[in-house]
Amino acid sequence: MSIATENAQKIAVKGNTPKHDKTNKIVSGSEALILSLIEEGVDTIFGYPGGAIMPIYDALYHYRHVLNHTLVRHEQGATHAAEGYAQMAGKPGVCFATSGPGATNLITGIADAMLDSVPIVCITGQVPEKFLGTDAFQETDVMSLAMPITKWCYQVADADEIPYIVAKAFYIARSGRPGPVLIDITKCAQFNQLKKPFKYEKRRQIKGYKPACKPREKDISKAAELLNNAKRPFLFVGHGVLLSKAEKDLLAFIEKTDIPVASTLLGLSAFPTDHPNYVGMLGMHGNYAPNKLTNKADVIISVGMRFDDRVTGNLDTYAKQAKIIHVDIDHAEMGKNVTPTVPLIADAKEALQALLPVVNENKHESWHLEFKKLHDEEYEKVIKKDFQAEGEHIKMAEVIRRLSEKTDGEAVIVADVGQHQMSAARYSKFRRTDSWLTSGGLGTMGYALPSAFGAKMGAPDREVVAVIGDGCFQMTIQELGTIAQSGLPVKIIVLNNNFLGMVRQWQQLFFDNRYSFVELSNPDFITIAKGFGINGQRCTHTDDLDASLDTLLNSKEAYLLEIVVEKETNVFPMVPSGMGVDDIRLE
Ligand SMILES: Cc1ncc(C[n+]2csc(CCOP(=O)(O)OP(=O)(O)O)c2C)c(N)n1
């Protein structure tokens, strides 16, 4: 053991941050990585060791009291946990994986983070430099795999580059439109001593990379003019509002302008669902009124959203009558799907702050009434029925309604992908910001269990409830082991319909009832949870629903509540794939 490492061990065991002792000292590439992470304020890592990342894990051992490493059960779990952590802690999540299968197991989660703009920093070990390109044991060209699904990736073969590259990676991950980055470090670079003493400088800029710009005055005045003259203005809230922490600015803007507000799937919880101006969710399984009236609004202002195809439906018939003000930090989003009248390239917070003084105080009573009329129609034809129990069978919507009531809209809901996700999105009440996590862009089944665990680590004081389908649960079920070992009180609800429900719904509606491989014969989830050391119960009857939800929420430890729900309920409203937003169906 080197003297440097020995010192580090002493310092780390004492619980002090060892950075000052290490500055200007010669350390190994592995130790430089660990020190760089500490300099970036990292205290939490999700990972899984293996051959090509052994030196980094050895360096980590000496800093185990400074950096809290969580051993996941599959590298995909590490990426989703890092995503959940990043979104709740408000800083990049970090994952470690070995080369080859470790690195390829990260890929789904990295792609997920890319599509949903979540800042994560992935570190992979790589075979020694001299073996690169030789099909060495566990060699994968992770750079080529990561290139299209990261904001930036880099392979380090020279230990001296490590501090500089880590600083660059963190800056890129969190700046502008956030996203995943990957650093692949060869084993030699991990082992080798730096030639220069360790020094760390946080990045505040990178030449040629301009992640954010101030809104241009002329765009602000054009936008204000459109809004001030609008008779039927409509505001869309996207994930960008949460990312820029613009919730209060949005509220002030809406209270002044009285514009109706709808949210995208990822914008949920940025605006309180009980606010009188909130009209519901946009998109394929969103609410009736906001979808229909998208094609009636005269001015649409979209804040931090990207007109994803799940929101727009058929672009040929999408909001053709409206003037569109598109506020987004990412230049590349302008005109990608929808051509804006005013492209407002800016951080959501800055744009809303600049707009606030120049928009008029207004009232839009008759426009609000149009939303109300359509909402009432949706209530009669869909919502009321979603809550009516038919005999003993429990409905997903009813579970979510009661969960929201019991948590007073204050819990963090982490939803997986499918019918349960759409039920949770439609029926959760959000009274507090940062209360909704889901895989929106990639729609990754298996996201919720590890993400919920990461979210709990990022916000230990919040109640975190994962809402998962029986299909999704079995994609990352092994992370029950991580949850049990960590001792974190993550609450898990599995809505079991013995089907890949969302696919079954499509087969029923659009493939003439041909149910092709969507029925699941499930294991006993409670026995499995107990095998992992997690307590749980199964609820099969509406009469037991309240008591079982109370047990889940009152548990001081992680708890699994499996709720057997109606097998063949469909989620409505629905914009059929390829149709326009005003073709939305109520049944
Ligand atoms: C990794 C992955 N594979 C396949 C799909 C396609 N898919 C979307 S929803 C869904 C069904 C999910 O089933 P379940 O978890 O039981 O939830 P439910 O829809 O029944 O609520 C499937 C297969 C996907 N989104 N992700």
Image: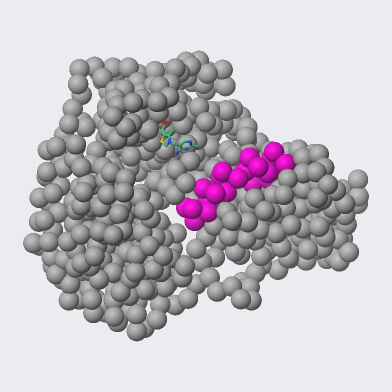
Give how far across and how far down residue 310 sits, in percent.
Answer: 35, 50
Residue 35, horizontal then vertical, whole percent: 74, 56
Image x and y of residue 205, in percent: 61, 73
Quadrant position of the N terminus in the picture: top right
Q: Is residue 30 left or right of residue 48?
A: right
Residue 50 picture quarter: top right
Reply yes or no: does residue 36 show up in magenta: no
**Residue 103 colored in magenta in the image:** yes
Q: Residue furthest bottom?
A: 218
Q: Nearer the viewer, residue 333 or 64?
A: 333
Residue at position x 81%, y 39% in the image: 137
Give 196 or 391, whichever is nearer the viewer: 391
Secondary structure mostly seen in magenta is helix
| Highlighted magenta segment, given as a residue range | 95-117
Q: Is residue 439 above or below residue 402?
A: below
Give the vertical position of 55 relative to 393 (above or below): below
- Identify the residue at image location x=76%, y=53%: 185
User: Which residue lies at the image location 11% right of the left edge and 45% below the top edge?
Assistant: 376
Quarter in which the C terminus is drawn: top left
The image position of residue 259, as x and y in percent, is 21, 64
Inspect this view and state whether residue 338 appears: yes
Quadrant of residue 169 within the rendered picture: bottom right
> Left of 10 or right of it: where is 333?
left
Question: Could you tell me if residue 256 is visible in this image?
Answer: no
Which residue corresponds to the image point at 63% horizontal and 40% vertical from the top-left? 105
Closer to the camera in the image, 390 or 350: 390
Going by the picture, which residue comes out furthest to the right? 2
The correct choice, above or below, for 404 with respect to 274 in the image is: above
Q: Name the side, left or right, on which 350 lies relative to 72.
A: left
